[in-house]
Image (cartoon, rainbow, N blue to C red):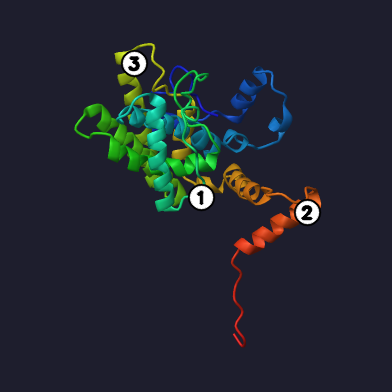
Amino acid sequence: MCHATPQNYKIQMPNDRLHVKTKATFVSDVLAMGTKKCFLNLPDLAPAMLVCPDWLHTMDQLTGADICGMLLTEIACNLEGGSFNTKVSILWTEVKQLYAELKVGCKLALTPEILSKGKESRGPPTLKGPSAQIRHFALLLLVLAEKHLDSRVPHQLACQKLARYLAQTYEAMETHEPQALQKAGLKMAKQYDELEKEALRLDPDTTNRHIMPKIHLCQRLCEIGVPVKDFGTYKDETMGGTLAKKFRRRGGEDNPSHNASEVLHRWKCSTAFPTLRPGG
């Protein structure tokens, strides 16, 4: 869709992202990969209509998850305690309190494995879990960062800023504010880039703050100028999570008819219906 490459995506600016491929170039590039034509032969479709990044896979499942994982690892290492596992356990106790205070429904159980820091885990830290849980966690992260990171220490202040910009990005997405989303998204990407550069200066082989190419798709989404919550994958996945909770069995019959009936019954019990007043 655009001219970004694995070599230049980190240095692309908003003006660079305005230049997109023509349909002919886009189709030619896709066919060169050996992809079947499929819908590419449909007339008058611009690349932006053929390929559209979505928030769920770009932010919730990658860039947002990576930033959450990196900052949570940073916060955990800053806590008092013995091993990393013990520190994560202490942090999880605090997260549960935040979940209760803020009445968060989509809860993610924090463990070293969830942070890609378990025995068999390799690569940079990230937050692994359903998109709805990560989406809610991105807003809790700022509370944890401001409490446990020392703003008098330049590196920890930089981590606090990244948590703040991530929260602002999610808030602007939720409230449909295109200008605020573009501004926050740009700050978030720049801050993330600076932290990666700092890490590489200290250790050229480190992957602790490794930026993935989808940061470029994240920036495009933040600059797209339309409500990203209107994209199909966002609404479909949110509804899927809601239905999954209502389909959860607690015993009894197990067949399609009974399960569907139970879901309908639970939905009716949890949905507010208008009150009809006599003569109203």
Residue 97, horizontal then vertical, whole percent: 40, 47
Whether tag 2 and tag 3 are in contact, CB under 8 A, the answer is no
Among numbered discs 2 and 3, the one appearing first in the sequence: 3
Residue at x 45%, y 31% (from the top left corner): 17
Residue 8's tag is none
Q: Is residue 231 left or right of residue 196?
A: right
Badge 1 marks a residue whose secondary structure is loop
Disc 2 marks which residue?
258
Can residue 261 be seen from the camera position used here?
yes
Amino acid type indicated by mark 3 = Leu
Residue 105's tag is 1
Among numbered discs 3 and 1, the one appearing first in the sequence: 1
Disc 3 marks which residue?
200
Amino acid type indicated by mark 2 = His
Whether tag 2 and tag 1 are in contact, CB under 8 A, the answer is no
As rendered, which of 257 and 46 lies closer to the eye? 257
The quarter of the rendered structure image containing the N terminus is: top right
Badge 3 marks a residue whose secondary structure is helix
Badge 2 marks a residue whose secondary structure is helix
Amino acid type indicated by mark 1 = Gly
